[in-house]
Image (tube, rainbow, N blue to C red):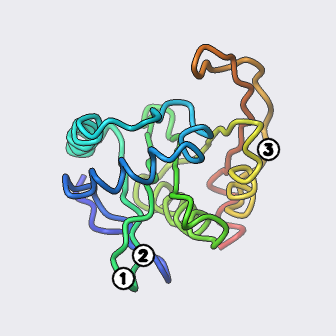
Amino acid sequence: MAITNLETDRLILRKLALEDAPHIVRLAGDYEVSKMTLNIPHPYPPDVAEDFIKTVRENWENDVSFTFAIVRQEDDIFMGMIGLRPEMKHLRAEVGYWIGVPFWGKGYMTEALKRVIQFGFDDLKLNRVGASYRIDNPASGRVMEKAGMQHEGTFYKYSIRDGVPMDLHFRAILREDHKDRS
């Protein structure tokens, strides 16, 4: 799918580039970021970032998933990533994201999530966009709530991180609910 950058008032969401690797290593590799995810390693090996970017770009070209770099418009600073993995057979997608600690609490992730949800409904013609978050990461739940995602349930011991079972909350927004918010 030929996708150009997505923009918001303060952000540009664009394809990842190999030049983003050092920023990913530095920001995602921060223990405060990685500990709230299910799969970001700590420390983050530099070669893993480059391989990840190559895989993300292949997935994009094959319409498997769309992972965007989150960049601040005013100064072109890389802040994090947000991705959407559609399942077109069911017209749904799952979204995942992270943002570097220096950018926490400023509304950037909510802004990015709202734009990606809009992309899912307007461009991909999805009926549903969902996401999960660790129950010990209520900030992520607030981001989803501000983007209009409704709590759907809790799955206990749903995923494993570092050998420890993790409980996850699930949220989603439906196309008709998104239209009502627009």
What residue type is disc 2 on? Arg
For image coordinates 70% across by 36% down, the residue present is: 134
The answer to whether mark 2 and mark 1 are in CB contact below 8 A is yes
Q: Which mark is residue 180?
A: none
The residue carrying pointer 2 sits among few (fewer than 14), some (14 to 19) or many (20 or more) residues within 10 Å by Cα, namely: some
What residue type is disc 1 on? Asp
Q: Position of residue 129 (x, y in %)?
A: 58, 46
For image coordinates 46% across by 53% down, the residue present is: 82
Disc 3 versus disc 2: distance between alpha carbons?
Answer: 29 Å
Q: Position of residue 76 (x, y in %)?
A: 33, 77
Badge 2 marks a residue whose secondary structure is strand
Disc 1 versus disc 3: distance between alpha carbons?
Answer: 35 Å
Q: Which residue is mark 1?
A: 75
146 or 78: which is nearer to us? Answer: 78
Badge 3 marks a residue whose secondary structure is strand
The answer to whether mark 1 and mark 3 are in CB contact below 8 A is no
> Which is in the foreground here, disc 3 or disc 2?
2
Q: Which mark is residue 72?
A: 2
On screen, residue 64 versus residue 88, left or right, reads left
The answer to whether mark 3 and mark 2 are in CB contact below 8 A is no
58 or 161: which is nearer to us? Answer: 161
Q: Which mark is residue 151?
A: 3
